[in-house]
Amino acid sequence: MKSHLSFSTALRRTAGLGLVVALATLGACKAQEETADAAPVAEAVSPDGTITVRITDQAMELSQAKVRAGEVTFRIVNAGTQPHGFKLKGTGLELGNIQPGNTSSVAVQLQPGGYDIVSIGGTEASGAEEPELATRLQVIEATQ
């Protein structure tokens, strides 16, 4: 004897199956999204020891958050409208005012650890110092 399902029972089963498929697909997409989000962390280490420091009048950004110990080259780009200085605390490395639109480069040997990078805008001659901008660079073992 054949069993006949009512229309509403068949609809509920089909909807339930659709919900299961939708949840499985959503879970797979979420896992893929998390993997994609995790990838930049591994790439956050500078592959060639060069860090670009982009300074505007409101912020300072690093091209990578980490670099391997050894010789590190800083490429400082002043994308702001005011002169900005560059200082790598704890190393004695300091550059004078970099004019708007200009780029300066400097290399330094760094050991593993955390380094604060600061920039002070304005010019010493005018006496109009802007608030200090700061960021942090993590230097990891050369073998990591």
Image (cartoon, rainbow, N blue to C red):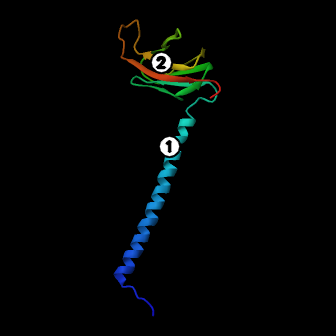
Name the residue tied to disc 1: 37
Q: Residue furthest front?
A: 1
Q: Secondary structure at mark 1?
A: helix
Residue at 41%, 88% (x, y): give it: 4
x and y percent of residue 71 in the render? Answer: 63, 18
Q: Quadrant of the N terminus?
A: bottom left
The residue nearer to you, when weighing 105 against 46, is 46
Q: Residue at x 41, y 20 (%)?
A: 133
The C terminus, quarter of image: top right
The amino acid on which the numbered mark 1 sits, given as a three-letter code, is Asp
Mark 2 Cα-neighbour bin, 10 Å: few <14, some 14–19, many ≥20? many
Q: Residue at x 56, y 21 (%)?
A: 75
Distance between the alpha carbons at the discs numbered 1 and 2: 26 Å
Mark sitting earlier along the chain (1/2)? 1
Q: Position of residue 2 (x, y in %)?
A: 45, 91
The circle on residue 117 is 2
Give residue 15's quadrant in the image: bottom left
Q: Horizontal and vertical percent for residue 132?
A: 39, 17
Can residue 107 be seen from the camera position used here? no
Amino acid type for the residue under numbered disc 2: Ile
